[in-house]
Amino acid sequence: MSRLHSTPAQHGNATEEVSMLDVRRLRMLQHLAVYGTIAATADALHLTGPAVSQQLAVLEREAGVPVVEKRGRRLCLTPAGELLVAHAEVILGDLAAAESDLAALRGGHHGVLRVTAFASVARTLLPRVYQLLARPVGETAPRLTLRLDEQEPDQALEALQKHRADVVVAHSYTVLPRNFPQNSHQDVLMEDPVLLCLHPDRARSLGLSPGQPADLARLADAPWLTPSPEVSCYEMIQRTCGTAGFVPDIRVRSSDFAVLVALVAANAGVALAPRLAIPESHDGVSLHPLLAPVTRTICTVVRSGSTRNPDVHLFRSLLEQAVAQHEPTQRDQI
């Protein structure tokens, strides 16, 4: 039943009907908070705009106070609407948890899981997950189907909020923390060090042997190769160099780290990159941790209440196996 049930309250000889809040309408209000417009909310819920408006009006009657208001041409939540959305997140999370527990009780039938991950994880870890899923098992064993989209964390977390993704693999840097949605749960997957990529001749000129920590301030006058500004790694590099006391002289921008590493091997400049983003074959490049370390924390993010979902649990387990297989190779190549 999709209502928060209530009963009439007796006051003397009069009976006062206590309003009931319909979970479906709370979900609609939560979608409006995420999508921002009636049209986008209607599209996400496969309804018409007038139907959404009508249900919001019913929700206001149930609540007894306005939950939305017009500000210019925009429709915004009132304080009461924001309060209801906060409660709706909890309620919807609890419903998702109940559905997950029931799925587990039924034997953990595995279906389709929509995963969104950034490029270096999609390139290095997700292929190993697919390999693990492809291992021969009993004919009757439940299988998991993955639908993978490659997106930067900001776009991926938006997809999670809009129920276009079930699991997001995201990251944050020690110099660039990330704000995660309030209605989400994060589990750390691994710590990924940021490394300085140098041509061997440049490394020798700095007196650095392979794997020796580097003082970034000594690269203040070097030509820099960085990702494009729309990639969060670009801001990480700006902040890291700023902490070292300089603004990098950027000569090349490419969101493909393989391009940046190849150009470092050609002695076109220097680059900073998370270890996972650096191709396993990086001949002609000397890798160095930073004297003032910078780390990228990689985590999985799901909506609150879905952490016990059998599909989520299986995917997380396979991803952890992929990390365990990959990390020894990483250590050997620094």
Image (tube, rainbow, N blue to C red):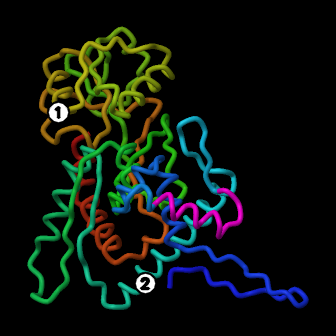
Specify start and end residues of the magenta stretch as a single range.
52-66
Q: Quadrant of residue 141?
A: bottom left
Q: Is residue 50 above or below residue 200?
A: below
Q: Along the horizontal axis of the image, is 257 left or right of 300?
A: left
Q: Is residue 218 above or below residue 305?
A: above
Q: Main secondary structure of the magenta part?
A: helix
- Name the spot of residue 283 as percent of width and height, x first: 12, 31
- Name the spot of residue 201 as percent of width and height, x first: 20, 16
At 35% from the left and 55% from the top, the residue drawn is 43
Q: Is residue 318 above or below residue 249?
A: below
Residue 59 among magenta residues: yes
What residue type is disc 2 on? Asp
Label 2: state its secondary structure.
helix
Residue 334 among magenta residues: no
At 36% from the left and 57% from the top, the residue drawn is 44
From the image, tell me which residue sits under label 1. Answer: 258
From the image, tell me which residue sits under label 2. Answer: 101
Sequence-first disc among 2 and 1 = 2
CA gap between label 2 and label 1 equals: 43 Å
Q: Along the horizontal axis of the image, is 224 left or right of 16?
A: left
Label 1: state its secondary structure.
helix
